[in-house]
Image: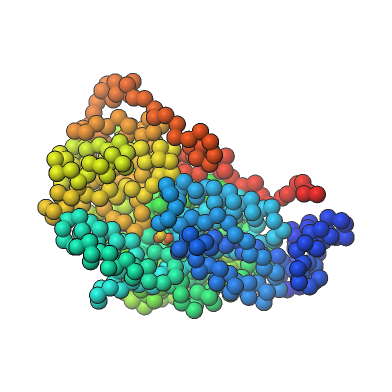
Amino acid sequence: MSNDGPGTPVQLRTSHWYGGDTRDHYIHRSWMKRGLPDDAFSGKPMIGICNSASELTPCNMHLTELAEHVKRGIWEAGGVPFEFPVTSLGETQIQPTAMLLRNLMAMDVEESIRGNPIDGVVLLAGCDKTTPAMVMGAASVDLPAIIMTGGPMLTGRHEGKRLGSATDMWKMSEAVRAGLLSNEEFMATESVMTRSAGHCNPMGTASTMASMVEALGLTLPDNAAIPAPDARRKRLAHLTGRRAVQMVREDLRPSAVLTRSAFENAIRVLSVIGGSTNAVLHLLAIAGRVGVELTLDDFDRIGSHLPLLANVMPAGEHLMEDFYEAGGIPAVMAELEELLDGDAFAVTGVPIREHWAGRTTWNRDVIRPLTDPLIAEAGIAVLRGNLCPQGAVVKPSAASPELLTHTGPALVFDTIEDFKERIDDPDLDVTADTVMVLRGCGPKGYPGMPEVGNMPLPAKLLAQGVVDMVRISDARMSGTAFGTTVLHTAPESTVGGPLALVQTGDVITLDVPGRSLTLHVDDLELARRRAEWQAPPPLAERGWYKLYIDHVMQADTGCDLDFLVGCSGSTITRESH
Ligand code: FES
């Protein structure tokens, strides 16, 4: 069957549903027509718009408006659009943590794409986990797919000062606890913190993942940073729809884009933008779906020595709106050109170097040159040692340089509830040298690995002017947050990782330059503690929680479910009637 538009004719997948005169073809067409002309079902690429809009996912609320612009582009290019909803995850709303449901959303995306009559798909995402979930699901089907994220919010402004969503919230809440800001003043910023449609506007996880999918070549150029309410994002949506139709005609699938080179490019971009540690988990999980051998150590080997170029919160001072006006991801990639593989193939059907060709940086304070970075070595560091035999991560660009090498006594919290109960106790035995250890917050143990690794500092130390401490956990940290926090410690405590054996008073050494995390307790004593250790009782007996706990993998491989790794393709072998 040939197509109406330009490009190499391909046998459309949807011809299985619509391309014949049997009873079943009749059923599929008749129930779907509802006003569509007959020729909509004869050789036009049918493009699904996989929409994670939800009024319970505030960062994605506006995606339905963008979907209308995607549809215009699809119609214009000779395709037929069909928008469909999928699970959505609002990072600030859903409990106990959106990460618990990332893989569920990915399953929903995967099966919704595979089971429905579509030839290609536009993925609309935004809030943190929605972007990786979309890509994981689509990659496991491997139909032509292009993603568009919803864009960051406009910069918040309050009493003459700029507010970075979440980043300044963390800072102000600590200032309240330190007695430096009244709670009234803090609450007065609530309405301006989220000033417009869009996701968080620092280089948090949403902006980072939007940048990652752009660096991977899965989006049109400029996707990551155009602010959500900007008319240029509507234009991008139109062009994305148009491009999806052409991708079907070219049979251009995620497996052609998501190569080892693409991931290496993404890791380098992650480093120089000061991106979220969450990207480590998500990129590992996406790589697992497409069979690319990517390891935790690749992030350190490929990216850790790279400098910080993006002067964007939380590592810097500007916000995504400024980053876009300074040139956005194409300008960053142009800056990094000599370190990137420009031959990596993008959804535009061209080598990705064409995405940055001719692009320049308009504001050198926001995007620095390689010769004058903000920080000389800013990429995510991967630690090893007897406290994290399967690794742990730390983000030096968000940490205090003087704490990157530190030895101190442990103060252990068994759960986040234990932490909250004791942290502001005036009698808590803690000093600025203490290493705070939080466990029970891993993928299986919480479950879902919440973003609590940036434990607030004890109120009495805040009052003394302490602004950072070494913190270690098997949890994650919001990409908008900061601090000398060792995260993703693996194996997690709940499965018997060494974190389970630490006792208050044990001495711990963090040595980021040496890439080590050491618990100074001898092996005999650790063996004794292990013999006494008892695994906590199962946290769930039914439903998604049980499936997740039984099958989620550890942080060092990206926390996908073990049976979701890989790709099942787009073929449907059985009929529904
Ligand atoms: Fe949605 Fe921050 S809460 S991106």
**Residue reaching furthest to the front:** 184
Observer-nearest residue: 550 or 319?
550
Observer-nearest residue: 307 or 18?
18
Observer-nearest residue: 444 or 373?
444
Where residue 184 appears, as percent x and y from the top left, is 23, 64
The answer to whether 567 appears left or right of 499 in the picture is: right
Q: Residue 445 sits in which quadrant? A: top left
Where residue 286 appears, as percent x and y from the top left, is 52, 51
Which quarter of the rendering shows the N terminus? Answer: bottom right
Quadrant assignment for ligand 1? bottom left
**Residue 498 visible within the image:** yes
Residue drawn at (56%, 68%) of the image:
64
Q: Residue 515 sits in which quadrant? A: top left
Residue drawn at (65%, 55%) of the image:
113
**Residue 266 visible within the image:** no
State the scheme by which the image is colored: rainbow
**Residue reaching furthest to the left:** 464
Residue drawn at (63%, 64%) of the image:
83
Where residue 298 appears, as percent x and y from the top left, is 42, 48
Q: Is residue 80 above or below residue 532?
A: below
Q: Is residue 329 above or below residue 441?
A: below
